[in-house]
Image (spheres, helix red, strand yellow):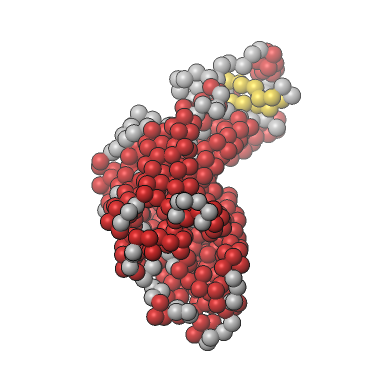
Amino acid sequence: MSYGMLHHGSRSRHALDRMDRSPSPPMDSDSDSEDHHIGLRGGEGGYKLEDLSQRDDELGHRDANSSEDAKERTGFRKIRRGSTSTIHSFMLYTPDEERSVIKKFDRRLVLFVALLYMLSFLDRSNIGNARIAGLSEDLNLSSLQYEWLLRAFYITYILFEWMTLLWKVFPPHIYLSICVASWGLVASLQSLAFSFSSLLALRAALGIGEAAFVGVPFFMSFFFKRDELAFRTGLFISAAPLATSFASSLAWVITKIGTKTPISPWRLLFLLEGFPSIIVSVFVFLYIPDNPQSAQYLTPRERRVAKLRLRKEKDDSGNGTGRKGLQWKEIAQTLVDPKSYLTAAMFFCANVAFSSLPVFLPTIIEEMGYTALQSQALSAPPYLLSFLTVILTAYLSDKHRTRSPFIVFHALLASSGYALMAITGSLHLSPHVRYIGVYPASMGFFSVVTIIITWTINNQDSDSKKGTGVAMLNYIGQLGPLVGVHLYPESEGPFYVKGMSICAGFMGAVAVLAFALRSILERKNRKMAGEEGKEEGEDEGLVGEGRRRESKRFVFML
C-alpha cells in the first residue's frame, strides 16, 4: 500500500528507484521545515520519503482520458480525501512511532499520577477510619466538631481551586512535587494533633495541598490529544474507587497494629498513610516531565514525535508553541462562557450523589447482619466494579470521539440505582435488594465524573481556557459534597428515603444538562462550518479548482 502519491511515467519511476536506494533525509531536526511536500511510501525496507510537490503539479495536468492516469489520479484523490491531518502525520512520523510514544506516556506518566491520586484520596478520607480508631475519644470531639473537621477540608479545597492555573506558571515537576510533599507532610502531622483547633488547622491546610493537585487532567492534556484524554483521565480517576475498595481493610490492619504499640491506633493511621507521599514527592521531582520534549524516558526521536503529533491541535486552537504562560483575555472569556457553567453544574450534581455513598453504604451492609470485617469485604465489590466500568467507559468515549452519550447513559444508570434504593427503603424491603442498587449508582457517578472533567478540557481551545475551565468546574462542582453529606441525617436512618430520592433527582439532572450542552455545541459547530464553507468558496476562485485550504477552526467535541 502506498502512503505517498502514486507515480507515473518512466522518468518518475527511475527517480523513485534512485530515491529508494538512497538514504532517507534526516527527520530529527528541531526546525519545523520538515512540514513541506514530503510523503511516505511503504516498502520492504519500511517507510520511504519522496518529494510530492512535482507529482502534484504533474498529475493536475495529465490527460483525464488515459485509463492509467485516471487510476493514478483516483488514487491520489483517495489519499488526499482521507484526511489532511493524516497525510501531515505520515510526512513527519510513522504510526508505530506514535504508538510507542503513547505507550511510554501511559506506563510512565498516567499510572504514576494515578498512584499519586490514590495516595491523596487515602490521606483525605482516612479521618473516618481514625474516628473509629479512637480519635474522638482522645481529643474529646463532639459530633459538631467532627463535622467541622470535614468542612474545613472542603472549604479550603474549594477556595484554592484557582491554583489549577499554576500548572502554566511553574514547571510541573517542581509544582507537583511541592503539592505531593505538602499534603503528605500535613497528613502525617495530623498524628501529632493534641486538640480540636490544631487538627482543624491541619485539615484546612490539607485541603490547600490537595486543591493544587486537582489540575492533573489539565496537565495530561499537555501530552495527549483530545480524543485520547478520556481514557487517561479514566485511569487517573479510577484510582479513587480502587483506593476505596481496600482503604477500610488497610485501616483495619494499621489500627490492629496500633493496639500493640505505644502509639494510639488513630495516630499510627495518620502517620503510615501520610508519610509515603513525602517519599514519593522526591520521585515526582526527578521523573515527572514538564512537557513531551523533557520526558527522560523518551529517545530524542520520540521526544520529537511527541511534540509533532500535538502540533495540529495547537495550530487548530490558535495556541501556538510561542504562547506561554497565562493569557488573561482568554481567562476572562472562559469566566463568561455559558458552557463552563453547564459542565460545572453537571459536576455539582454528580458530586452530591458521589459524596453520599460512603454515608449510607456501611449502614446498608450492617443491616444485612454481617460482622465488621465482613462489612468491609462487602464494601469492596461495588468500588472494584466501578473501577472497571470507568476504564471501559473512558476507552469507548475516546474511541467514538464523543462525550455526551456516555454522560447521559451513566447518569441515568446512577439515577436508577438511587431510585431502587429509595423505593426498597420506603417499602421496607430486604436490605439485600437495597445493596444491589449500590452497584449501578457507584458505576454511574464515577464514570460521569470522569467524562465531565474530560469534556471540560476538550471544549476549550487554549491552555489558559482549559486551566480556567477546570478551576471553575471545581469551584462550583466541589460544593456538591457540602450538600451531599447533609442529606442523610441519623434521624432519617436506616432507610434514608429522602436522601436517596434527592440523589436520584440530581443524577437525572446531569443527563438533562448533558443533552442541553450537546445541543448548544452542535449549533456552534454548524454555524462555524457554514461560515468556513463560505470563506472557502471565495478562496477557491483565487487558488484554483480542487485546491481547498486546510480547516483551522476549532470543532467542539459532542
| Residue 455: percent from left, percent from top | 44, 52
Q: Is residue 124 visible?
A: yes
Q: Is residue 207 visible?
A: no
| Residue 297: percent from left, percent from top | 55, 28
| Rendered view: 308 above or below 395 | above
Query: Measuring 34% from the left and 64% from the top, which residue is drawn there?
Result: 140
- The foreground one among 119 and 341 is 119
| Residue 39: percent from left, percent from top | 59, 26
| Rendered view: 494 above or below 101 | below
Find residue 90 and report its image quarter: top right
- The foreground one among 528 and 122 is 122
Query: Measuring 66% from the left and 25% from the top, which residue is drawn there?
Result: 47
| Residue 553: percent from left, percent from top | 40, 43
Pick out the residue farthest to the bottom: 427
Label tally: 0
Classify residue 465 as left or right of residue 83. left
| Rendered view: 426 above or below 444 | below
Q: Quadrant of the N terminus?
A: top right
Find residue 389 and report its image quarter: bottom right
Query: Measuring 52% from the left and 44% from the top, which residue is drawn there?
Result: 115
